[in-house]
Amino acid sequence: MEDKIVNAGFEIVQELHIADSVLVLGVNPELVGKKLTTPYVTWECDKDKKNFWWGHYHKNEYSAERDLVKRGMEKVRFYDRQKGIVKENKEPDER
């Protein structure tokens, strides 16, 4: 990633680009290790990473990483439907 990007105190540490969508994972270092906090977040954002929306907040990094991947797969399915792409094999149900 280029320069450090911070939104609402959360430093963006991972990005996922899928077609026209950008998903990010942020961490607020001041909240890490503190009880009853959610120091990690995933957001969707614009390509310039200036506007962020639909935040999902998490207590630990692994949960946030899983959410980033899950949101990414949701975008893949969205764009597959939009482009009329049909998969031969169904993906297993998420549990």
Image (cartoon, rainbow, N blue to C red):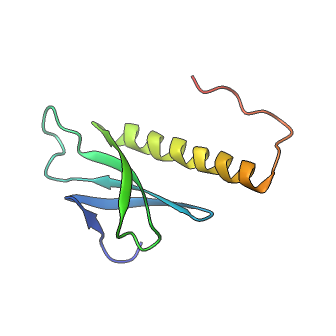
Q: Is residue 76 above or below residue 3?
A: above
Please provide percent x and percent y for residue 44: 44, 55
Residue 49's image quarter?
Answer: bottom left
- Count of numbered circles on the image: 0
In the image, is 17 to the left or to the right of 2?
A: right
In the image, is 34 to the left or to the right of 41?
A: left
Residue 89's image quarter?
Answer: top right
Please provide percent x and percent y for residue 74: 59, 44
Residue depicted at x 36% and y 59%:
52
Residue depicted at x 41% and y 59%:
14
User: Farthest residue in the top direction?
Assistant: 95
Residue 57's image quarter?
Answer: top left
In the image, is 95 to the left or to the right of 66?
A: right
Residue depicted at x 15% and y 32%:
36
Please provide percent x and percent y for residue 16: 51, 59
Q: Is residue 30 above or below residue 92?
A: below
User: Farthest residue in the front direction?
Assistant: 82
Residue depicted at x 31% and y 38%:
58
Compare residues 48 and 58 and report the one nearer the observer: 48
Compare residues 45 and 9 and report the one nearer the observer: 45
* Image quarter (top left, top right, bottom left or bottom right) of the N terminus: bottom left
User: Farthest residue in the bottom direction?
Assistant: 3
Please provide percent x and percent y for residue 63: 39, 37
* Image quarter (top left, top right, bottom left or bottom right) of the C terminus: top right
